[in-house]
Image: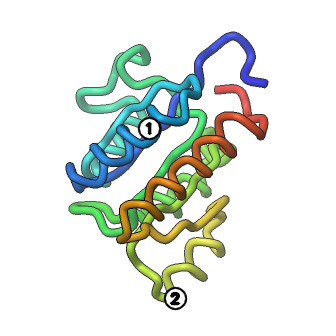
Amino acid sequence: MFGQQTPTLLVIEDSDEDFVALQRMMKGASLPHRVERCTDGDDALDFLYHTGKYIDNKTAPRPSLILLDLNLPGTDGREILHQLKQDDSLKMIPVVVFSTSSNPKDIEACYEYGVNSYILKPIDVHKLKMTIEIFSKYWFGVISLPDS
């Protein structure tokens, strides 16, 4: 399914609380993947384009999947998504938006830009756990991701 490499999930999330909850709940799914995190849009673009502190490909491996929050400091998630899907070298990376925004305009814009999935962050802890388990099992246990 993944070849010989462990898939890398790039989480672009500014909330420490949301990221810690995500990591803890993903560990429960027991699926093999590496998790990298960027806390703002500019940091994420540096990671993806190997600039700034991410020049070394070993510290910034090409992600197999991106989990993207929309409301980020600096370059926001909408702009990151738009840039990724316009770039021939990055547009094949699946992007899943994971946001609190249920604004139909945000959802529509993300699908117009080419997002692969849009998930609303549940506020309820049990629903959040279930959502993350389904996300993990689907993206790292069921489907085939493109080679990095």
Does residue 131 appear to the left or right of 70 in the view shown?
right
- Which disc is residue 105 wearing? 2
Q: Is residue 59 above or below residue 143?
A: above
Q: Position of residue 42 (x, y in %)?
A: 28, 50
Query: Farthest residue in the bottom direction?
Result: 104
Q: Secondary structure at mark 2?
A: helix
| Residue type indicated by callout 2 | Lys
Residue 108 falls in which quadrant of the image? bottom right
Q: Is 53 positioned to the left or the right of 78 in the image?
A: left
Which residue is at a point 46% across and 83% down the rendered structure image? Answer: 102
Question: Which kind of residue does numbered mark 1 sit on?
Answer: Leu
Quarter occupied by the C terminus: top right
Under tag 1, what secondary structure? helix
Q: Is residue 138 above or below residue 50?
A: below
In space, the residues marked 2 and 1 are separated at their CA atoms by: 26 Å
**Quarter holding the N terminus?**
top right
Residue under the image location 26 percent in, 52 percent down: 40
The residue positioned farthest toward the front in the image shown:
126
Task: Quickly name the residue at label 1.
Answer: 48
